Amino acid sequence: MSSSSNLIAMKKVVQQLRFEASIHRVKVSQAAADLQQFCIQNALHDPLLTGVSSSTNPFRPQKVCSFL
């Protein structure tokens, strides 16, 4: 029984390898260029680069209300 389970396991491995070989891959240089272009295009909308206005910032310190 060991040989039949070994054969089934090897068939699964071959099937997985065939699946992985059929996946379309992008070169790292192309992916890096695409990522850089995306970052440049969206830099104006990035709050980490442009900052957040105090009126729309949900984490701004709350004003202290004092009664006289």
Image (spheres, helix red, strand yellow):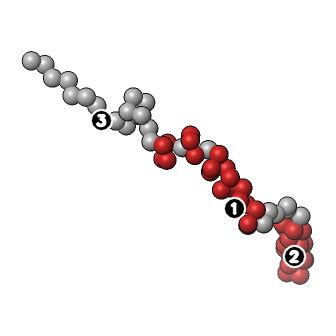
Classify residue 2 as left or right of residue 63. right
Residue 12 visible in rendering? no
Q: Residue at x 78, y 66 (%)?
A: 27
Q: Nearer the viewer, residue 41 or 59?
A: 41
| Rendered image: mark on residue 62 | none
Asked if 27 appears above or below 4 in the picture, the reply is above
The percent coordinates of residue 47 (x first, y second) are 49, 42
Looking at this view, name the residue that lies furthest to the left.
68
Mark 2 or mark 3: which comes first in sequence? 2
Question: On screen, 38 above or below 60?
Answer: below
19 and 9: which is toward the camera: 19
Q: Which residue is mark 2?
A: 10
Amino acid type indicated by mark 2 = Met
Instruction: Name the amino acid type tagged 1.
Output: Ala
Q: In the picture shown, does residue 40 fall above or below 16? A: above
Q: Residue at x 54, y 43 (%)?
A: 46
The local secondary structure at tag 1 comes to helix
Quarter where residue 7 is shown: bottom right
Question: What is the C-alpha distance between the residues marked 1 and 3?
Answer: 39 Å
What is the residue that sits farthest to the top in this orientation?
A: 68
Under mark 3, the amino acid is Pro
Give the vertical position of 29 relative to 63 (above or below): below
Which quarter shows the C terminus? top left
Looking at the image, residue 41 sits to the left or right of residue 13; the answer is left
Residue under label 1: 32
Residue mark closest to the camera, 1 vs 3: 1
* Marks 2/3: CA–CA distance: 61 Å
> Dot 3 corresponds to which residue?
61
- Which of the two discs, 1 and 3, labels the residue nearer the N terminus? 1
Residue at position x 87%, y 76% from top?
A: 10
